[in-house]
Amino acid sequence: MSASATPMRAIHPDVTALLALGRAAGSLPFEAMPPEEARRAYLARRLMLQLPPDPVAELRDVTMEGPDGLLALRVYRGLGTGPDDILPCLLYLHGGGWVLGDLDSHDGICCRLANEARCCVVAVCYRLAPEHPFPAAIDDGAAALRWIAAEAGSLRIDPARMAVGGDSAGGNIAAVLALMGRDGTAPASVVQVLLYPAVDLSMSGESYRVTTDGMTITPATMRYFIDHYAPNPADRADWRASPLNAPSLRGSPPAFVLTCGHDPLRDEGRRYAERLESEGVPVTMLDLGDQTHGMLTLSKAIGAVHGTLPYVAAALREGWRVSTP
């Protein structure tokens, strides 16, 4: 790492140790690998860097008919909930740059949120790029949200207390689904949880210029992901790819937005939160200035995970509480 690239803001010691471990192991950045190889590397890093998922009251895998074949979903019900309890529900969209990730990669986050928020979480394994570029992931997320609403009885959830959430690319999809729910083109959500979200595919934010090389995600990594997800540059301006470009955010559901200091996406996440707030949407903003992108899936290495996820769950509980008539 060159002296000129060193950031001014502090880096958490856990992040420093994690990066040193990656350098010692000779880990390649995702952009140095074709997608299939990057997916295998992502899985291997999960096994090294994530603690085993917490037990939940119920976990089952199901399938639904999606826009282009069957989609896999995983349903979680949190500890302390009864089998007949009617629970609020979070649709969770995993991160991974629209190229990586599956139900297993974010199992730990979903289990923890189900337990801490005493809710049902439904995760969806949406189609990945480059095999399925934009807007396939959006179409799959919307289909999953419609399926949850239609299956509310069998899922034992309250369709009036649904939330959408996700991290990184999943945060992008969740933000779009929240706007679709406002507009009536998808079931309405009462809370949106955007964890270091990608909301502007132009890659023009200030944090793209100040983020150091060698972090978990760099500007080069994001360009790799975006080139695979939206290879047509004209698509990147579409608000369904870049929700920051939506003509209006007014009427969106209350939002929880998490950003990290050492992350190319920090600036756009903060701008999205500020714009939501300026257009009358209640926003809770949490900025972890010494943390790096993807930290919530690094539970073995990053101690802050264990305080951050309960905070996210508390925001969900509060959103559901105030939305209940």
Image (cartoon, rainbow, N blue to C red):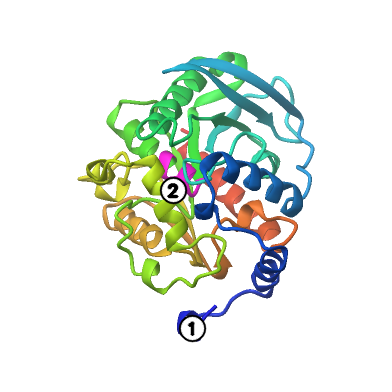
Residue 265 seen in render: no
Magenta stretch: helix, strand or loop mostly: helix
Q: Which label sits on residue 170? A: none
Determine whether 155 is above or below 4 in the image: above
Residue beneath the point at 29% across and 42% down: 251
Viewport quadrant of the N terminus: bottom right
Residue 19 x, y percent position in the rendering: 65, 68
Residue beneath the point at 56% across and 58% down: 29
Label 1 sits on a secondary structure element that is: loop
Identity, as a three-letter code, of the amino acid under mark 1: Met
Write down the quadrant of residue 81 in the picture: top right
Determine whether 297 is above or below 286 in the image: above
Counting residues from the start of the chain, the first of labels 1 and 2 encountered is 1
Q: Nearer the viewer, mark 1 or mark 2?
A: 2
Bounds of the magenta span? 167-173
Residue beneath the point at 27% across and 41% down: 232
Residue 245 x, y percent position in the rendering: 25, 48
Residue 42 seen in render: yes
| Residue 241 left/right relative to 260 | left
Q: Is residue 24 magenta?
A: no
Q: Residues within 10 Å of mark 1 (few under 14, many from 20)?
A: few
Label 2 sits on a secondary structure element that is: helix
Q: Residues within 10 Å of mark 2 (few under 14, many from 20)?
A: many
Determine whether 205 is above or below 234 in the image: below
Q: Are marks 1 and 2 in contact (CB under 8 Å)?
A: no
Q: Could you say which is closer to the camera, residue 148 or residue 283?
A: 148
Identity, as a three-letter code, of the amino acid under mark 2: Phe
Q: Which residue is mark 2?
A: 225
Q: Which residue is mark 1?
A: 8
Residue 252 x, y percent position in the rendering: 34, 42
Residue 243 x, y percent position in the rendering: 31, 46
